[in-house]
Each structure stands twice: as C-alpha cells, then as structure tokens.
Image (spheres, helix red, strand yellow):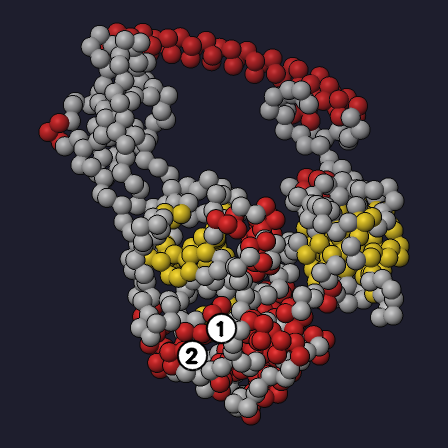
Amino acid sequence: MSGQQPGRDGNPQVFQPLAADDPTTIAGYRLAAKLGAGGMGKVYLSYTPGGRPVAIKVIRPEFGEDAEFRRRFAQEVQSAQRVQGLFTAPVIDADTDGAQPWLATAYVPGPSLADAVVAHGALPVEAVLLLIAGMAEALHVIHGAGIVHRDLKPSNVLLAADGPRVIDFGIAYAADATSLTGSGVTIGTPSFMAPEQAAGRKVTPATDIFALGQVAAYAATGTPAFGEGTSHGVLYRIVHEEPDLTGVPERLTELVTRCLAKDPEARPTIAEIIRLCQTANAETVLRRPEDWLPGSVAADITVRAAAPAPVQAPPPPATAPAVAYSPTAPVAPATPPPGFGPPPQQQPPVQQPAQQPVQHPTQQPMQPVQQPPRPYPAPPAHAHAYAPTQYPTHQQPHPQQPYPGAPVPPKSGSKRGVLIALAAVLVFAVAGSATAYVLQKDDGQKAKDTAGSAQGTDKGKGSDPSPGGGTGTGGGTGTGGSSKPSPKADPKPADFKAINLTAGYHLTLGDDDVRPQPGEDGGYELSYDTGGYLDSEVSEGNMVLLDPGQEGSLAVCRAETRFAKNIYIHKIAKGRQICVITGTGHMGLVTVQGFSPEDSPSKYMTLDVTVWRNAAATGSGSRG
C-alpha cells in the first residue's frame, strides 16, 4: 500500500477529493485529500500543525478485528519508528489500539517507481544505479531495526527529487498474521516475491535482496524479470525457472543476476550491492539530486509537490460566547488573545478585586455554546511517537469578563466582603510571620538533635549518614531536609557459561539458574525465535547489539540507548556482545561464543551470560 500515488489510468489524479464514505479527520489530523488505496486500506493527505504534509494510512476494519494482526502491527510500528534513514519515509505517528489502526509517515512528493515506468518507460542505466544504491541504503537501516520488508516492489518505492524513498516496511509481516490473506485479500505482489517466500519457507533479510534485484530489472526494462500472468504461474517461475534478463543493460547484468540467486546464502550483502553499483558507474553517489531522474519524471515530482492547502477551521466569533462560570478555573494571562471579548462599546468597567467572588447558590449558570472546530488537530486518545497535537487551548471566558482570565466584576454589595477578606489576609500574614520567627529561632537549637536523629535513622536502614546533615531543618522524617543518601553499590554479577540456547527456547534472567526453557513467543525476556533472530518481548524490555570490539559491562549497558526488540542472527558473529534490559529490573550481558554446526539436528547458539539483578533500577538512580 504505497498510498502516495494515484491509479494508473493514463491521466492520473494525484489528489483525489474525499468521498462521502471517507473520514474528515483521523485522531485530530484534518484530511485534505485522498492519495490512494491498497489491500491494507486507504491513504490520505494531511498536515502537522507546522504545515508539514503527512500521509495517513488507515488500516481496513477487517484487519483491525484480528487480534494477532494488531499484536504484530503494534510490534512492527514500534520497530519502524526507529528507522531514520535518508532513503526511507519515516513513521512519525500511529495508533495501533484504536477502532481502526492507522499510521502517519512523511509525505514524499514524487511518483512511485511503478507509476513512473508505466507513464514514461524504463529508466536509464545511470538512474537505475542511483535508485538501487539508495534502496540498498534504505534496506540497511530497515534491517538494522530488525525488520524484513517482505513487500519490496516498485509501488513501494517513491521517486523524490533527492533520491528514492522506500515505504511500507514491515506492514506485510502484520498482514501475514490474519486469515484474510487466505480468503481473497492479497498482500504483496507475486511478481516481486522471493523463492523462499513463494514456497512458504523462512523469510530473512536476503528475501529483500531478491526483491531488490527484481526491482532493478523492472526499472531497467519496464517488465518484471519473471514475466506477468496469473499469480500461480508467476510464483512457479520464480521458484523453478530462471529470470528473463535479455533486456537488462550489460552494466546491470552482474548486479541483477547475483541478487536473483535462488539460494538466499548466495545473494550479495548490502555492502556488496553498493560496491557493484559504484563499479558499474563511478557517479553512483547522489551528488546531483536535481537531475538524477529523466525530465518527464521530474515534472511529475513538481505536480505532487503542489499539494492542496491544509483544511482551515472557521474563524472564531467576534464576540465571546456565553459559557457556564467555573469559580475554580485557573487565571489566564492578563493580555487577551486576539478575537476574544466583546466589542469595546460593550465592555463593562473593569474592577480589580483581590480574589474572584464565590458564585452564590441562587445564581443560575448560563448554558455553554459549542465552540467551532479548532484549526489544528485535537489531541489524540493515545500518546504517539510524534505528537503534533499537544497545543494549549484557550480558556473559556466568563460571560462578564472582558477577556479570558480578567477578574469578574463583583456584584453589588460585594465590596464589603472584599474588605473583610483583605483584613483577614492581613491578620493571617501577621500571625504567620510571628510563627515563622519562633520556628526559625527554635530551629537553631534543635539542628544537632535533628541531624543526629536523621543519622540514626539512616544507619538503621543500612545506608551511610550524609555529611552536613546538621545544617538542615530535619532528617529522614522532617521537611526540607537537604541531605542525600549515598547511592547503593552495584549488584554483584552472576555468570552462566556455555548456555546452548536452541531456536524456539528462551531465557529468564531473573531465574536462580539461567537455563533454556521452551517457548519463543510469550512475553519472554530473551528468546531465540525460529525466524532467525533474538527477541525481547517483555514489557519495557530491550536489547542493544554492541559494536565489534566494544567491551560490554554494566556501565556500558546502562549508558547505551540503541535499543532493539529483535536482532537477526546473521548480524551476529562470534565474540559479539548484546546488552539485555529485561524490563523487570535486571540487566544482562550476552556474549556469543558460537553457533550449531550445519550437521547438527538442532539449531542453537552458545552463549555466555552475565546477569546483574535489579541493576536497572539502581542504575537509573545512580545516574540521576
């Protein structure tokens, strides 16, 4: 579901008007136009309060009714929000729990590769090399976040003025979880699947490499490498036959051929793909983004850059609406916002009482008048990674106030009450000053006793007394004590050597004897998923893959924030270390010591694990 390209009718309408069944707002985002639709749902154009265009992708209700889809969708959105690459459209907001799940990505003003090829034909070799190099960099950051795209195809690649953008990464994984994909709903395009994907075998990052080769062949020739036709026929050719590369230019032959290897292990890595592009053309680096595409495609970018203006709300009324008076409302700034308050000739004389009078029981509040829609999104029901809607709202003015926050003129006969209130304030002020003086005088005589009491209390709790405690006004039970307890010592590490963690099993770091337990999908702290990755599913749990040569320790694991929920095994070599934060207060350091041999009947990793019990809570306090 690219969503940012129109239909292929020869004269596409980029920004389609909203239909009767389209919503006008999504979680406070005002929709300006419809961008497209796909198997997953519809896509709309909207804007952040600062004027940045965004694409709102609303998932079909049928998917939202599937609990497993929602679980996977939430996991993929969380991972996608960590993808911040130059050649991806970042996910900036989402709601995975609402009646209809949705996510917002940055709007890319450019056609998809599919639309560009249909409208203008195949791209020149130089543009294809720049395209594939940019897509390879996009896959590098996507795979680095633990995501396999699974649906890399020309309609999911947008052509922007400064390079390609890969979109919709990870969504196909969530769609696989629902039974709808087996009942007439198609997610993914058969022409761009990998053999293992078509055969229902394990999907890995190498699956995206095969799709990248297909995209390269399509961009250079205008036709899929395995032809077109029925889904079953195309999938059979992908699994059992060789691609038709007769129209692929010679400079692209090695790149495409290696990417389309049937064996995932024989396909090139991301780094090798970029080197192949650079070898084929020394100008592969995107140094001239303004002319990397043919002129006809660049003209399409100009059309899409002229997006419709954001939908504006009606202007506020000239006079202040009458609302019910709330004596507990906070006082607003003294300067009235523009557009509020009655006309000057209707303003009553402003009086400045010491405090607002309490409403009399016999006073009947006036009924509130509904306010017009705000010109910016209303706050959504859930907190999101990107929060464009958190804006202060204007306080509703009192019907007698000349502007919000101005003191309400007292009714007749209230001046006497004001004077009595002022007198009472003065009496309490004098009494309070006298009390403060006595307390301060007595405080100096009791300082030593108070400090001694505080030290005795601290010793009873097993912590060291804080120096200088006698200068405060109280110890552990007093008010305003200035002494701070010393930080607790780091917990002692518990080491577990040569753990053979089999695929489909997990570890719980809080166990006295950390050893593999069956199960890979149940909120575990560290599991070896049969999909080929380490997984941290527990709430607030995370992992950090340390850099090669980086020596792990408790201090390092506390300081690192390059969090990931899962780490693919092909990214881990012998000797690499992984910090594990369990979310239950424990921290661990995993050192990879080896992998199971090819002739082993089971698939496992050999790990050394060091555990610090309750180190996460202690660490946050010591660093605070």
Q: Answer yes or no: do the residues labelled 2 and 1 have beta carbons within 8 Å?
A: yes
- Helix, strand or loop status at disc 2: helix
In front of the other: 224 or 265: 224
Residue at left 42%, top 45%? 27
Please give the residue where the numbered disc 2 appears in the rendered image.
117
Label 1 neighbour load within 10 Å: few <14, some 14-19, many 20+: many
Q: Which residue is mark 1?
A: 154
Instruction: Note whether 622 is above or below 453 in the view shown.
Output: below
**Hey, what amino acid is under mark 2?**
Val
Relative image position of residue 494 (x, y in whole percent): 86, 47
The mark nearer the N terminus, 2 or 1, is 2
- Residue at 77% x, 21% y: name it: 456
In the rendered image, residue 322, in percent from the top left (x then y), is placed at: 23, 26
Q: Residue at x 55, y 71 (%)?
A: 231
Q: How many marks?
A: 2
Describe residue 534's horizontal placement relative to residue 151 as left or right.
right
What amino acid type should be assigned to the residue bearing mark 1?
Pro
Measure the alpha-carbon separation of dots 2 and 1. Answer: 9 Å
In the rendered image, which quarter is residue 534 located in?
Answer: bottom right
**Going by the image, does 245 lie left or right of 389?**
right
Task: Provide residue 159's location: percent of width, then percent of height.
Answer: 43, 73
